[in-house]
Amino acid sequence: MDYRSLLDRYFSGKTTLEEEQALKELFRKGGAPEELREFAPWFRLLDEEAGIEPVRSIELPAQRRSGWSTWRNNLMRAAAVILVAMGVWRLAPSPAPDKAVAIDWSKYEVTDEQEALRITRAAFKKVAQTLQFGASTAAEQVEKLGEISRSAAVRPSDRLE
């Protein structure tokens, strides 16, 4: 019998109960070939585990509860229920208002042409300053990268001299 292939089938879960029993008997009797002795501890462990009695139940001594502890436990449960209810109420979406309030934008409109031109020029000036600042910052960063790449181009042997 080829025990090596039987072991391969056993560990892949493809053996019958009779084949598994034959493997267990082989290792139990100690007649396994030398190249398969490394599997003997596994089958010994299976034998040991088969002999262990499962624990049916554990009986604990009955604890007598006083009226105070029962009352306190009920109070804690009620507090927990109240906290959960408050959390659900807090997280629940609030209903939308029935009527939308219209905003009167006419009081914010500029009616004077000169004032409108002044506001527009101020806005364009602010945009130009922001773009100029971004361009100068980018140029500085590019310059720093150039310095880093130039210093990295020097070979380590050149630095030692």
Image: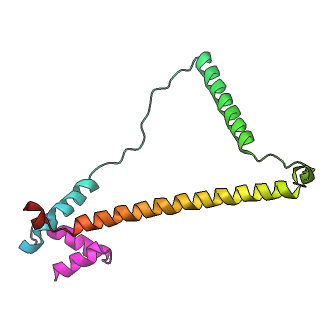
Q: In the rendered view, does 30 fall on the left or right side of 141?
A: left
- Which residue is farthest bottom? 1
Q: Is residue 12 found inside the magenta-colored segment of the image?
A: yes
In which quadrant of the rendered image does the C terminus lie? bottom left
The answer to whether residue 138 of the structure is visible from this angle is: yes
Relative image position of residue 91 (x, y in whole percent): 71, 44
Relative image position of residue 124 (x, y in whole percent): 69, 60
Residue at horizontal 46%, vertical 63%?
138
Tell me where residue 16 sits by quadrant: bottom left
Color scheme of the displayed model: rainbow
Q: In the rendered view, does 137 fall on the left or right side of 99?
A: left
What is the total number of numbered labels drawn onto the structure image?
Answer: 0
Relative image position of residue 82 (x, y in whole percent): 70, 32
| Residue 83 position (above or below residue 34) | above
Tell me where residue 30 sits by quadrant: bottom left
- Boundaries of the magenta span: 1-29
Q: In the rendered view, does 43 fall on the left or right side of 95?
A: left
Residue at horizontal 25%, vertical 70%?
21
| Residue 71 position (above or below residue 20) | above
Residue at horizontal 20%, vertical 62%?
42
In which quadrant of the rendered image does the N terminus lie? bottom left
The answer to whether residue 102 of the structure is visible from this angle is: no
Relative image position of residue 114 (x, y in whole percent): 84, 56
Q: Is residue 6 found inside the magenta-colored segment of the image?
A: yes
Instruction: Report the magenta stretch's main SS.
Output: helix
Q: Nearer the viewer, residue 66 or 155?
A: 155
Tell me where residue 57 sits by quadrant: top left
Residue at horizontal 35%, vertical 64%?
145
| Residue 100 position (above or below residue 139) | above
Q: Nearer the viewer, residue 156 or 70?
A: 156
